[in-house]
Amino acid sequence: MDFKVFQLFEQINYEGREEEVVQYLKQLDFFDAGQTLKYVINSDVEYERGVLVGSISEEYIPNSYGVNQDRGLENLDGFEPYERTIFAFDFNSRAFLVQNRKYTPKNLDPGRTLNRLTDIFNDAFQHVFESIFTAIPTTLPEDNEMFLRWFKVNRVTEVQVSNLNQRNTLREDISKDTDLNLSFKNYWNVEDDSKMDLLHLRSNTDGELNNNPIVLAAIHSPEVIIDKIRYYDNEEDKQVTVKRSKMDKFVVKDIEKDTESVTAFQQVINQVNENRRLLRNMRQVD
């Protein structure tokens, strides 16, 4: 399950009153969504290790019919379905996470759900902290820290980097061989006048690029932007592709659409705590 990541614009001194926000959300009643429909913050809101996590359920107009004894279609009376969307707020990084949903019902859409959640959190923050709640969209920080971390711990089979025109000051060693380092750096920094700006390399599925000198020189060149890597994930036993352009989302493993809330919430809390530095460094979209 993945989440869109927003960042709270305001700097707020929480003063240890996070639990008051939890209690505020738990006691909320149903909200009127129009067309006799409702939405509600579910009562099983949790707070642990700096992370508040819960869900909003939104009633929708079902596109479901029954078949009567005469084999004719008829509306199902008394059928009031709701769609659940999980959200979380990390008080440490000020990151606001909203499940990245694609809604089939016509009266639900991600923008409407986000607006409802921010309105509710705005009321909660005004009530508890006397401060507004403004959620700003974010994306991956401009640096390559996250990509380099994946590169160090996984078998990488594909790399795409750009902005290589500033590479003429490479200082990183790309080999344990001193002579190779000197000759390669001389070529990379001085002799190459190709004005190469983008490099895209791929190994076969059984190979790896982790020790390839060209790749190492590229990813460690000053001002370079790593746009994409593909690596083998041992836990999932498959190839995983990570693109910078898609990194406005935070992935929480082992949660499906119908995972029970208690299990889903704990996974969110665990993985937010494990990746708090990344969340803190995600920059606001201009």
Image (cartoon, grey):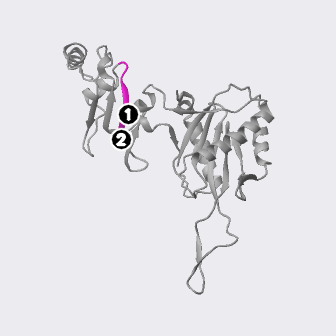
Q: Residue 186 or 27: which is nearer the viewer?
A: 27
Which residue is most to the front? 35
206 displayed left or right of 258? left
Q: Which residue is mark 2?
A: 231
Residue 191: numbered disc = none
Quarter residue 185 falls in: top left
282 displayed left or right of 208? right
Q: What x and y, as percent, mark residue 272?
A: 58, 39
Q: Residue 62 or 220: which is nearer the viewer?
A: 62
Label 1 crowd bin: few (<14), some (14–19), many (20+), radius 10 Å? some
- The residue range painted magenta reads 222-232
20 displayed left or right of 181? right
Q: Main secondary structure of the magenta part?
A: strand
Disc 1 is placed on an element classified as: helix
Which residue occupies 55% across, 84% down?
71
Q: Which residue is mark 1?
A: 151
Which residue occupies 42% across, 34% down?
244
- Mark 1–mark 2 CB contact (< 8 Å): yes
Q: Is residue 229 magenta?
A: yes
Amino acid tagged 2: Tyr
